[in-house]
């Protein structure tokens, strides 16, 4: 017996239950569509009061469906429901991106970041969990769009069966919407007369248009370079003979220094390391930079700091790295007075950007000789990466000084497990970390717990800062200059919903003339920047640094 025949027989045999089921499905369909039309695109907006409005889009949709004959009505209802479902998926992506990256989802640029998200889950939770999460997300998105389309078709058919009452209801709803809009009536601070879906669609459209417009404007900006034509002998003359290290500490943000739960441990570490370096003859100055990114996409922070361009999305990154913009690291290679090297333990695939950064040699995750365990996303502890840098490059005899770019990864989320410092002479091939990794906290125990994440984040930053400054204390010379900074703030779950994008930056050296060159910056003495220390856009750092150390502007492009 056909399935539909069985269903009809069951309905006829149980009319009361069938009627109750039908009405329940109508109510659920209405709740789904109206809820989707009222849905906000930020996590704080997900509160009951936001779903108490009258969506203008529902009224317009009802009027449209009431005016159409059966077949066009079904097609239009399906398309309308599909659109509402897609918009809901975009709202959910906005929520996720805002929580992790401090900005909404860009439909032009951000699809590639979903692969990075899956890789992060695989590194943190395992490949099986990552595959399950990816498949589940796709299935749920498709199911949401399909169910919303079917719900809209059901409601369209319901309106057609009760055309007179539906028309009267649409008129009443429309009148109520206009009255509430005119009087500014609100529930829990949210207007009752809602056009949330139209606003979300407008926002997504504006984001796309702005992205397309920005491409040409930014390409022109990238071609204009204040130091692009500066002769090699006029670049950083005041650092000649110095070994210069530019180090980025993952997620090292202002939150680490100022959050009441996190800061005590981090500031103790910064103060202790300032004192230890002073005993070794080093002194430091520290300030703040406002990063172009937040919560992730570290490469945007690296490229912004070193290029002098505000690189806050993937399109700008591709445009910049495919051009010939002079990077801060590239300036050292252009002089011909330095060997240049990159230490990138987080890089596990081809990295053509090395040429743009001006790096003669790059050591990625496979080149540093590490044979120990991974620590979640981080391929190796920072202490090991620094020791490998010393063994492979910094400690070698050479004819020219060395300029290095080092990306430290141990403070990358989910901040569990965290490596511990071991005796530098016992690092070996990294196997010494086996027991430490096994005894550490599981990422699954930390990732969903905001308080635990904040505590472990602070511990990871303290570990990275200590590793870097101990390396300097152990292996630095009178001619070593260390510049280290954060690439971005940690995610909102740790830094808070309205956190700034500021990150600490420090310059450390033994030679007093190196720090005298930046006296005009008015930075704080030591590794801990004062709350009122100067705050610059990260994109201004390249030009300020080049200028402070004697570089002469000679523009190119335009």
Image (cartoon, grey):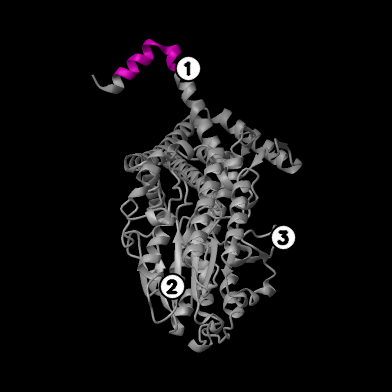
Name the residue nearer the viewer: 306 or 423: 423
The residue where tag 2 is placed is 357
* Residue 138 visible in the picture: no
Lower position in the chain sequence, tag 3 or tag 1? 1
Question: Outermost residue toward the right?
Answer: 183
Lower position in the chain sequence, tag 3 or tag 2? 2
Left or right for 278, reference 83: right
Per the rendering, the mark at residue 532 is: 3
Do tag 3 and tag 2 residues touch (Cβ < 8 Å)?
A: no
* Residue 490 visible in the picture: yes
- In three-dimensional space, the C-alpha distance between marks 1 and 2, rounded to whole angstroms, equals 67 Å
| Residue at disc 3, secondary structure | loop
Mark 1, mark 2: which one is toward the viewer? 2
Question: Outermost residue toward the left?
Answer: 1
- In three-dimensional space, the C-alpha distance between marks 3 and 1, rounded to whole angstroms, equals 65 Å
Q: Which residues are magenta?
A: 6-20
The rendered magenta stretch, by its main secondary structure, is classed as helix
């Amino acid at each position: 017996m056909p399935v539909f025949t069985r269903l009809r027989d069951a309905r006829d045999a149980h009319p009361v239950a069938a009627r109750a089921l039908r009405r329940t499905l109508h109510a659920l369909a209405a709740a789904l569509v109206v809820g989707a039309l009222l849905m906000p695109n930020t996590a704080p907006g997900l509160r009951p009061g936001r779903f108490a409005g009258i969506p203008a889009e529902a009224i317009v949709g009802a009027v449209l469906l009431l005016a159409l004959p059966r077949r066009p009505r079904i097609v239009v209802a399906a398309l309308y429901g599909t659109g509402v479902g897609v918009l809901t998926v975009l709202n959910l992506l906005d929520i996720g991106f805002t929580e992790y990256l401090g900005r909404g989802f860009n439909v032009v640029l951000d699809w590639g970041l979903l692969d990075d998200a899956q890789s992060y889950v695989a590194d943190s939770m395992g490949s099986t969990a990552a595959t399950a999460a990816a498949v589940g997300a796709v299935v749920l998105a498709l199911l949401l769009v399909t169910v919303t389309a079917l719900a809209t078709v059901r409601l369209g058919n319901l309106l057609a069966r009760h055309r007179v009452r539906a028309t009267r209801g649409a008129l009443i709803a429309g009148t109520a919407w206009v009255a509430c809009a005119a009087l500014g009536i609100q529930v829990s601070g949210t207007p009752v007369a809602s056009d949330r879906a139209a606003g979300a669609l407008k926002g997504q459209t504006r984001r796309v248009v702005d992205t397309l417009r920005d491409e040409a404007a930014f390409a022109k900006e990238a071609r204009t370079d204040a130091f692009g034509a500066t002769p090699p002998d006029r670049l950083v003359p005041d650092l000649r003979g110095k070994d210069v290290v530019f180090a980025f500490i993952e997620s090292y943000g202002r939150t680490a220094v100022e959050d009441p739960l996190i800061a005590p441990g981090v500031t103790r570490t910064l103060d202790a390391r300032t004192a230890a370096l002073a005993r070794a003859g080093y002194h430091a100055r520290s300030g703040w930079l406002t990063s172009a990114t937040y919560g992730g996409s570290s490469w945007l922070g690296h490229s912004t700091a070193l290029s002098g361009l505000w690189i806050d999305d993937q399109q700008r990154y591709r445009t910049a790295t495919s051009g010939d913009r002079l990077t801060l690291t590239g300036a050292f290679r252009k002089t011909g007075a330095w060997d240049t090297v990159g230490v990138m333990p987080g890089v596990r695939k081809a990295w053509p950007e090395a040429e743009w950064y001006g790096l003669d040699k790059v050591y990625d995750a496979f080149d540093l000789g590490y044979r120990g365990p991974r620590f979640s996303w981080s391929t190796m502890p920072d202490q090991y990466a620094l020791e490998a840098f010393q063994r492979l490059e910094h400690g070698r005899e050479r004819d020219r000084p060395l300029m290095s770019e080092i990306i430290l990864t141990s403070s990358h989320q989910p901040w569990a497990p965290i490596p511990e410092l071991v005796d530098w002479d016992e690092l070996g091939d990294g196997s010494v970390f086996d027991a430490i990794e096994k005894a550490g906290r599981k990422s699954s125990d930390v990732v969903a717990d905001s308080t635990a994440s904040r505590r472990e984040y602070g511990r990871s930053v303290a570990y990275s800062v200590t590793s870097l400054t101990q390396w300097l204390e152990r292996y630095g010379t009178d001619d070593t200059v260390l510049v280290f900074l954060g690439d971005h703030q940690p995610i909102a779950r740790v830094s808070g919903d309205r956190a700034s994008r500021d990150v600490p930056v420090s310059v450390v050296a033994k030679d007093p003339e190196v720090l005298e060159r930046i006296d005009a910056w008015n930075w704080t003495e030591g590794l801990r920047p004062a709350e009122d220390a100067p705050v610059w856009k990260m994109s201004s750092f390249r030009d300020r640094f080049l200028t402070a150390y004697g570089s002469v502007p000679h523009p190119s492009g335009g």
